[in-house]
């Protein structure tokens, strides 16, 4: 499978796969009030300002509608390049404060992210490390770990790929204690700075994980230091996707697939909720 569908061969391969039947793996979390999230962002809230029966038409018909409020980095979501700056600069070298004047990032906002229909690769790190229950809390996923998963699976990362890194931490998303997934005291496993450089050096178009911050969070450290975000979003121009559902495709042994994702075209926003799909032949 090619990295994109820009060639006749890539299009023909996709059409052939569709004709033979497809299996679709949903990689997005269901949005539910009270779900675990980074404390840095406004939580998800859903209400029905109009309910069935509030207004009834003469023919007996009625309708309900919704009001939703949430941060753009809550649930499964993608980070735009406008999301992170370093030393006051964004990925394109522009002044971060100036770029955000008026409350919108016109140049690097999430509306500038093109829909993704690309080769996807799942790097199942716990499988490579022999950790059946997942990486330990606060574990740093290294470049060697990513390379080991790549070798074990026989799925080399190619330029333009979307690389999804499974830590196994996603199993804690539905824990009754919603703070467990946040891992404030225990830390959260994830890619470290060297691992982020490995992904960028391989030419990844985007990188994702099954945690709220993608990268390793130190025990008790929270979001105090995010070097992988700096490397990917500011230095190298690689999008980040967080809070993915990866246990299902890992259990199915799916490590290579057609990855489909389209952010909401929120003009000037720093991120967007997404519902990514992994598509494979049935």
Image: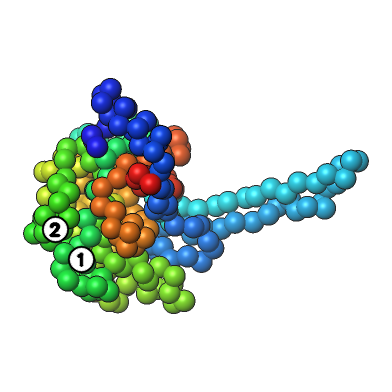
Where 17 falls versus 191 (above or below)? Answer: above
The disc at residue 212 is: none
The reply, left or right, for residue 80 in relation to residue 124 is right
Label 2, secondary structure: give it: helix
Where 228 falls versus 272 (above or below)? Answer: below
- How busy is the neighbourhood of tag 2: few (under 14 within 10 Å), some, or many (20 plus)? some
The picture places residue 67, in percent across and down from the top left corner, at: 62, 50
Visible residue check, residue 208: yes
The disc at residue 127 is: 1
Q: Residue at x 32, y 27 (%)?
A: 11
The picture places residue 208, in percent across and down from the top left corner, at: 29, 52
The residue indicated by pointer 2 is 152
Q: Is label 2 in contact with label 1 (beta carbons under 8 Å)?
A: yes
Q: Residue furthest left?
A: 144
Q: How many marks?
A: 2
Q: Residue furthest front?
A: 20
- Is 200 in front, or is 25? 25
The picture places residue 10, in percent across and down from the top left corner, at: 27, 29
- Is 227 in front, or is 253? 253
Q: Residue furthest right?
A: 58
């Amino acid at each position: 499978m090619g990295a994109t569908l820009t060639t006749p061969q890539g299009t023909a391969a996709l059409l052939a796969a569709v004709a033979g039947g497809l299996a679709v793996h949903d990689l997005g979390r269901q949005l539910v009030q009270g779900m675990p999230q980074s404390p840095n962002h406004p939580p998800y809230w859903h209400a029905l300002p109009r309910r069935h029966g509030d207004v009834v038409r003469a023919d007996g018909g009625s309708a309900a509608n919704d009001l939703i409020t949430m941060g753009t980095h809550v649930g499964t979501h993608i980070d735009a390049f406008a999301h992170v700056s370093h030393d006051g600069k964004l990925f394109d070298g522009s002044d971060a404060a100036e770029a955000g004047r008026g409350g919108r990032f016109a140049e690097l906002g999430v509306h500038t992210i093109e829909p993704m229909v690309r080769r996807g690769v799942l790097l199942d790190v716990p499988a490579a490390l022999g950790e059946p229950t997942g990486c330990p809390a606060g574990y740093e996923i290294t470049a060697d770990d990513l390379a080991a998963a790549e070798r074990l699976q026989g799925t080399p990362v190619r330029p333009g790929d979307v690389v999804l890194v499974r830590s196994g931490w996603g199993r804690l998303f539905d824990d009754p204690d919603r703070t467990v997934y946040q891992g404030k005291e225990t830390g959260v496993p994830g890619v470290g700075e060297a691992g982020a450089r490995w992904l960028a050096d391989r030419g990844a178009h985007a990188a994702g994980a099954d945690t709220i911050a993608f990268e390793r969070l130190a025990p008790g450290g929270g979001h105090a230091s995010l070097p992988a975000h700096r490397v990917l979003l500011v230095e190298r121009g690689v999008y980040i996707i967080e809070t993915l559902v990866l246990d299902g495709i890992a259990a199915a042994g799916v490590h290579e697939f057609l990855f489909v994702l389209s952010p909401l075209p929120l003009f000037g926003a720093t991120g967007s909720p997404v519902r990514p799909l992994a598509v494979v032949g049935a």
